[in-house]
Image (cartoon, rainbow, N blue to C red):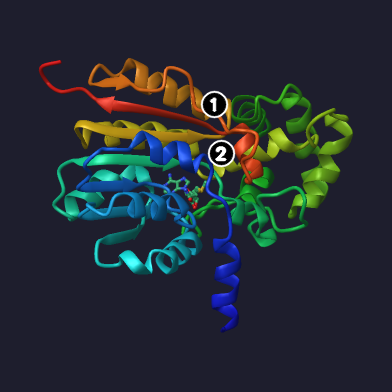
Amino acid sequence: MNPKRAMLEQKIKHFPVLLKEYIKIFDGKEIDFFLDGTLGAAGHARAILEAHPEIKTFIGLDKDQVALDLANENLKPWMGKANLFHENFKNLDKVLDEMNIEFCDGMFFDIGLSSMQVDEPERGFSFRYDAELDMRMDQNTEITAKDIINTWPEKKLEEIFREYGEERNSKKAAKEIVEKRRRNKINTTFELIKVLEPVLGKRRKIHPVTKIFQALRICVNDELNSLKEGLNKAILRLREDGIIGVISFHSLEDRIVKHTFKDDETLEVITKKPIRASFGEKNKRARSAKMRFAKKRKKNE
Ligand SMILES: C[S@@+](CC[C@H](N)C(=O)[O-])C[C@H]1O[C@@H](n2cnc3c(N)ncnc32)[C@H](O)[C@@H]1O
């Protein structure tokens, strides 16, 4: 086996979160058009294509070219019907227009980072590895975590740490960064940790910089705005009786999903409480995952 293929095989062995529960929701549903907005390694995509051979057209998006290459590899058996795009799901309307598809019968978003992205040291997402502060999901976008840390004003840093990280020491963290970067640019994950650890203090359950890292990656990838925009567009392109589902991994995302579903009069919420992982889930990320589904009401309902 060639080394590139072997590496892909290795990565494909990641475990999609809440897979059985996901498939169960679509059980018995006739699906012609299905959109997966966050392909990743295409674990959920494979499962839905296996469970629903009647799917005529599958549309898959990911803003990460590495993930897309992997998904391409993983979805080879369905290449006749699978159409994959390097695209942010907030632009799903453009992709559907391009394909002349007005409505989908099912839509799914497993948002946030994949374990592949977190475990790839050079992407700079993880505080476990020493790497350049990058954190871009889409390698074509310009702004990196390094740019934010080294150029944004103190007030703005404080704001993102508070809003996107819910970090209680956001003010102290921002002040320390600005002070330290005057002398030396902060280039890497470990340099940032060295600056922040003394001001953040020890935490019992999580690494002290967890929330700052979360804030940075949400900001670099404009994650919350993409989620709001993408969900609203998805709902408009969901067929009557069609089902939309989202897996989220922290409270900021889950709040958006919950309220968007609840406040939209065209939707009926299927999961009054989010579906959570059972004890036996193999994927560690599953512990914090929450999955919610809603159905598009029929016009006369
Ligand atoms: C948790 S992984 C998906 C895993 C996938 N369900 C599987 O079974 O392999 C999330 C993926 O969504 C992608 N992503 C996150 N936000 C996105 C967005 N706004 N548009 C497109 N892709 C996005 C990430 O690049 C990542 O590959």
Front residue of 212/129: it is: 129
Q: Is residue 161 left or right of residue 242?
A: right
**Residue at the image point whose x is 25% and y is 16% from the top:** 265
Q: CA distance from mark 2 to mark 1?
A: 10 Å
Residue at image position (63%, 41%) is 285
- Residue type, mark 1 in image: Leu
Nearer to me, 33 or 231: 33
How busy is the neighbourhood of tag 2: few (under 14 within 10 Å), some, or many (20 plus)? Answer: many
- Residue placed most toward the observer, 172 or 86: 86
Residue nearer the viewer, 192 or 46? 46
| Residue behind mark 1 | 252
Pointers 2 and 1 in contact (C-beta within 8 Å): yes
Which amino acid type is shown beneath numbered disc 2?
Ile
User: Vertically, is 158 above or below 102?
Assistant: above
Q: Residue 158: where, in percent of width, then height?
A: 67, 28
Asked if the residue at label 2 sits under 8 Å from ligand 1, the reply is no
The image quadrant that residue 195 belongs to is top right
Q: Is residue 182 above or below residue 167?
A: below
Q: Residue 55's spot in the image, x, y percent? A: 23, 52
Q: Which residue is mark 2?
A: 218
In the picture, measured across the screen, residue 32 lies left or right of residue 272, that is left
Quadrant location of the C terminus? top left
